[in-house]
């Protein structure tokens, strides 16, 4: 009988240790395996008829000397290959697939041939502008691209045990270690698009090579100091942009380079860059124990989660710069809320959970995952939202194209700039990693997703078999198998959406009063094989209201049940959703609809709407009171919107008080 | 004792016949006389320190050979001089001013010297691109600029009896008659920016020369036919824009050239161009009796007034293209609602009133005048709104610059592109013209503005002395003086904002039941000197609601009293106007505030607002009902907004039903 030793650091239970058995999530994971990743491979090989040309694989072949031709695509086109390989790696963890692995190995061989003598790997610069390497970090994404390849190398190594890509990315990283720093002849700068920071910490994680961690810290520490590196760089090339001879305008906030990271108090600029940066900062804070960096992470987390986040877990409310705007500014219609930004927010939340397990991180992680992330992909795995509006009127998107060009009422096919689909793929393929952490003798269960998990606590092997009825019902059941009876704690998240939580251990009520810490119910006891824990969460339909400072939602209400945010669609409610009003006391009924988007629970309510038919032709009237008529309002989970005919959609509806 | 003969055509009582004595309006007219026009003269002479360079007068001097130098400003810079002269002319009608007239005469002399041998007059092309005349009507505003000079010439002739500018503009017009048409060697086209059409009808009006009317009709008839004139023109110059060698994109709807004018059913494209075109169409319909043209005017009027007009009489809801968007699309915050567009709408309404006196035209005319037009100018006459929002949050204008760059929370100083201020000046200086029409033996009183009017009905001279308490109280009193007792009708508009109208003739109730036709109470009797008519209009505070199809205003209410639309400002209500809710049954109190913007009536109401203080830091909450607290809401007339500190403003507020 063992007593598990306590350590300070939490760490995630890795993908290898988790086998997801959950129907809700396996649908998506299998979609990634069966549709998204195969499709992406064809797309980056330019084999999809009618799709935009990618050139990504061919660029590597050209750089490897295997093909003739010119570079094609964005300066960061290589990352499409990297993200594909990373997703493949995650898929191989949960299901070996020799054929897929061989395709990946062949790709990796080409990548190896494209790598320069000194470790440099970037097909754009190798093919097109070999003399311009590392000369425009502001705009050219070289470290960003390197970062994605490093993530792929680490993932592929962890999945297969093969060092083929890992060796390549170590050489990339070694080269970057040589090139960057404050030493003579080195570049004392950092990338315009953060990503390398978190990638280097992953590489440190598998190699144990501290210079990678140091370099990540270097990039983070350097960022935002004056004089501006981006300006120095611009000065050296005569203040032009990389793409033409126009004058460059450097908006330091866009790059989060307006202040040193520890002095930043609010999330500003390009949202994906913000959260990738914060993920890297949290990594470095965790690995180095840097308190001021942790403090900055907490501060920026709070700013995002309590002032700049949509109810769907979307972030970045402004299309211009794909950026955060300012506190409490969350327009539902001109919104950006890029799928990738929510994925980055999940990366950040996941890392904060390892730093300090607290349900506020997992609550947001869950919110982004169940709403924006899976809304980002259609049920066929072939159509994607880059922008995730909370209110759509197709007529407005068409008719006011200048302000709404970015907002699409239907999911789009794979793009030339294919950032979101592969990001969804790699997140979903690695979902198992997000479910549990272990800190000392406590196993934290962050997400309620059915699956088997094996882990080791001190000398004890623990197997947890979670069965979850979420997101439709509120029960998660854990069955414990231990190699020997052992005392440890199981910490179950009490989500922010649950009005009441009960725990049963071996079928008997287990009081969690005084046992909830940082949002987790801590069940510490001696466990033996066959023990079961049930977490029963009340999952009523909730009326959610926004902080009154959110101008756009004042007087409005949104419905949420469990982790799922709901929305009203034209398909159910007819057009002109602005007419809908939900009485504060309306009964909200929940019913299962097996036919919509794979089956889901629908909410209906006796509601009101502004009378239209008797209004007449006058644009303005002063001769009548407001005339409301009864109607049935129907709400479906936000993730399932836009799976029927193109039409209006709204998350927030007027409340009739 | 005469019986006045009936004729078919209505015509406005001219500016010469009206002397405004109304305090409310004389403030604005005197502001134009004492501040705007003198300031504008200094501005177009580049004598205002710190102001943007104009170059307008200097361009004429260069073209006249009196100065050396290069053309400066927009291709339509000449129109600033033309509109200044037109405003001067109107001011001289109501108050002779020898010094001002001398300045104008000197300017006209320079203009004469700048005119080419063949009558052509446009300093941009004369100075800069003499070989490019009439080669790019799509973009270069040549006929538009000519039109403004023609309007000035007509106005100056009518004001002073001098032919100096009239002769110049007749030569301009004669040249245009030669250049344009379907004959050999002629240009079979029309201008990108309508204006010449209405100007030519004015010139026809004073000269009686039918070729001007014919040419106006030609431009109107030609517009929008296929093959596209703009495309033919583009073809001839190789599809470049005039300004550089970039490819031109011709959006025919922007220019209202997508369809022949008689086939257009909805107002589309640049709003000012639409209403200038419609004014010209109404002119030609009136002068030629063209029924199909009148039908098109009515149809487009209806589209604008019942589907595309803000409650303030603003039109053009889209910044992109300064344009109409689509039916019922009236966003309050990203609005355009250019001051010039409302002025153009007044021009159009005024002409429709002569075609068919009907209060629907005068109601809109009044709405635009009392709200958007005078909101466009500050009380000091030196600051102007080009864009007239119905909802402003300064933080949003700053923080979301890309979508809100055009929306200013405070009035701006004179611009380089100074279209709106001189347009306000010429409208207000000629306001007398808009008050009455005569049709047959009926005098129509469209606007309730105090003043003396002299007119002739058949052989009878009639003098009407109107005293009006509007816009603050609802009484207009007319005293009649006649050269001999005569039978004729006085038609008093019953405005759409009046809940009850009573008429007293010589102090005795006069039943207007069955006497209201097309929105006018027709009082037909024999009149003798000393007769008085009082029109007493109930002027309650009205709760106005929008058609339910107006997405942005659903569930909201605006207050209006008489012709004045009201708004809530931060100065009275504190920030965060989104929190305000006006109960449907709230008592609305009206009180006079002598200190605000020259004195005005304020509306206050016992209202509610969303509780803020007890909300806490959470962005979303599910654990409380909506919490409302009592507050006093204060509303001031929209025209007077932004005369205090920069802050929020909203016309439409939530209604608590």
Image: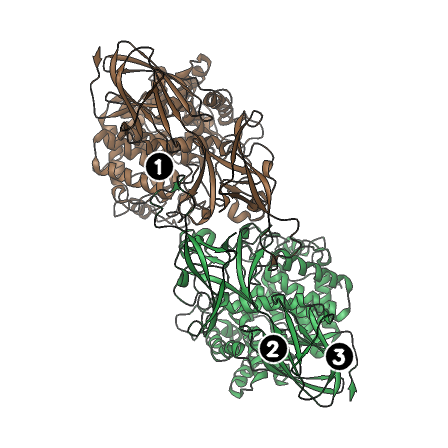
Chain colours: A green, B brown
- Of all chains, the one bearing label 1 is B
Q: Callout 2 environment at 10 Å: few (<14), some (14 to 19), or many (20+)?
A: many
Residue ID for mark 1? B275
The residue at 54%/81% (across/down) is A104
The secondary element bearing badge 1 is classed as helix
Q: Nearer the viewer, mark 2 or mark 3?
A: 2
Q: Nearer the viewer, mark 1 or mark 2?
A: 2
Q: Is residue A348 above or below residue A239?
A: below
Residue ID for mark 2? A476
Q: Nearer the viewer, mark 1 or mark 3?
A: 3
Which comes sooner in the sequence, label 2 or label 3? Answer: 3
The secondary element bearing badge 2 is classed as strand
Q: Callout 3 environment at 10 Å: few (<14), some (14 to 19), or many (20+)?
A: some
Would you say residue B460 is visible in this rendering? yes
Residue ID for mark 3? A441
Q: Callout 1 environment at 10 Å: few (<14), some (14 to 19), or many (20+)?
A: many
Taking depth in this image into account, of B267 and A112 the one nearest to the observer is B267
């Amino acid at each position: 009988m063992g007593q598990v030793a306590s350590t300070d650091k939490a760490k995630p239970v890795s993908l290898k240790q988790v086998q997801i058995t959950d129907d809700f999530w396996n649908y998506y994971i299998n979609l990634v395996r069966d549709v998204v990743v195969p499709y992406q491979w064809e797309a980056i090989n330019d084999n999809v008829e009618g799709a935009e040309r990618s050139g990504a694989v061919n660029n590597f072949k050209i750089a490897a000397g295997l093909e003739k031709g010119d570079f094609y695509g964005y300066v960061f086109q290589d990352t499409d290959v990297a993200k594909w390989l990373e997703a493949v790696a995650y898929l191989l963890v949960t299901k070996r697939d020799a054929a897929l692995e061989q395709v990946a190995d062949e790709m990796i061989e080409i990548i190896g041939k494209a790598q320069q003598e000194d470790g440099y790997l970037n097909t754009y610069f190798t093919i097109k502008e070999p003399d311009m390497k590392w000369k425009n970090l502001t705009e050219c994404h070289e470290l960003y691209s390197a970062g994605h390849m490093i993530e792929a190398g680490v993932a592929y190594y962890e999945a297969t045990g093969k060092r083929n890509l890992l060796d390549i990315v170590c050489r990339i990283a070694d080269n970057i270690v040589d090139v960057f720093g404050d030493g003579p002849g080195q570049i004392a700068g950092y990338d315009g698009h953060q990503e390398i920071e978190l990638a280097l910490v992953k590489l440190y994680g598998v190699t144990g090579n501290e210079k990678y961690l140091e370099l990540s810290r270097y990039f983070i520490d350097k960022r935002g100091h004056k004089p501006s590196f981006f300006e120095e760089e611009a000065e050296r090339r005569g203040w032009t942009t990389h793409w033409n001879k126009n004058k460059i305008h450097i908006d330091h906030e866009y790059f989060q380079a307006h202040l040193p990271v520890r002095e930043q108090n609010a999330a500003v600029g390009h949202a994906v860059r913000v959260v990738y940066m914060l993920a890297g900062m949290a990594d470095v804070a965790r690995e180095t124990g840097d308190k001021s960096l942790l403090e900055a992470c907490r501060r920026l987390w709070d700013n995002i989660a309590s002032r700049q986040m949509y109810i769907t877990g979307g972030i970045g409310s402004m299309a211009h710069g794909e950026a955060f705007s300012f506190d409490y500014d969350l327009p539902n219609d001109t919104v950006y809320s890029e799928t990738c930004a929510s994925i980055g927010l999940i990366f950040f939340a996941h890392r904060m959970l390892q730093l300090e397990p607290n349900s506020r991180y997992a609550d947001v992680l869950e919110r982004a995952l169940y709403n924006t992330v899976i809304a980002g992909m259609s049920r066929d795995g072939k159509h994607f939202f880059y922008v995730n509006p909370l209110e759509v009127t197709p007529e407005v998107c068409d008719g006011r194209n200048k302000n709404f060009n970015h907002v699409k009422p239907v999911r789009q096919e794979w793009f030339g700039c294919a950032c979101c689909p592969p990001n969804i793929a790699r997140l979903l393929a690695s979902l198992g990693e997000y479910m549990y952490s272990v800190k000392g003798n406590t196993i934290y269960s962050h997400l309620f997703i059915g699956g088997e998990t094996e882990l080791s606590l001190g000398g004890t092997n623990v197997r947890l078999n979670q069965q979850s009825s979420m997101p439709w019902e509120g029960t998660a059941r854990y069955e414990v198998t231990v190699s020997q009876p052992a005392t440890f704690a199981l910490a179950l998240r009490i989500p922010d959406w649950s009005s009441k939580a009960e725990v049963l251990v071996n079928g008997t009520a287990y009081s969690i009063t005084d046992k909830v810490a940082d949002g987790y119910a801590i069940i510490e006891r001696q466990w033996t094989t066959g023990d079961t824990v049930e977490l029963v969460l009340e999952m009523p339909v909730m009326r959610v209201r926004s902080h009154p400072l959110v101008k756009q939602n004042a007087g409005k209400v949104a419905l949420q049940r469990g982790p799922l945010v709901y929305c009203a669609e034209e398909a159910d409610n007819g057009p002109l959703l602005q007419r809908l009003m939900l009485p504060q006391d309306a009964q909200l009924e929940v019913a299962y609809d097996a036919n919509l988007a794979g089956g889901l629970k629908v909410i209906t309510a006796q509601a009101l709407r502004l009378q239209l038919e008797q209004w007449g032709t006058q644009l303005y009237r002063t001769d009548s009171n407001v005339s409301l008529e009864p109607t049935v309002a129907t709400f479906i989970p936000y993730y399932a919107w836009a799976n029927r005919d193109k039409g209006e959609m709204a998350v927030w509806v007027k409340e009739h008080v």
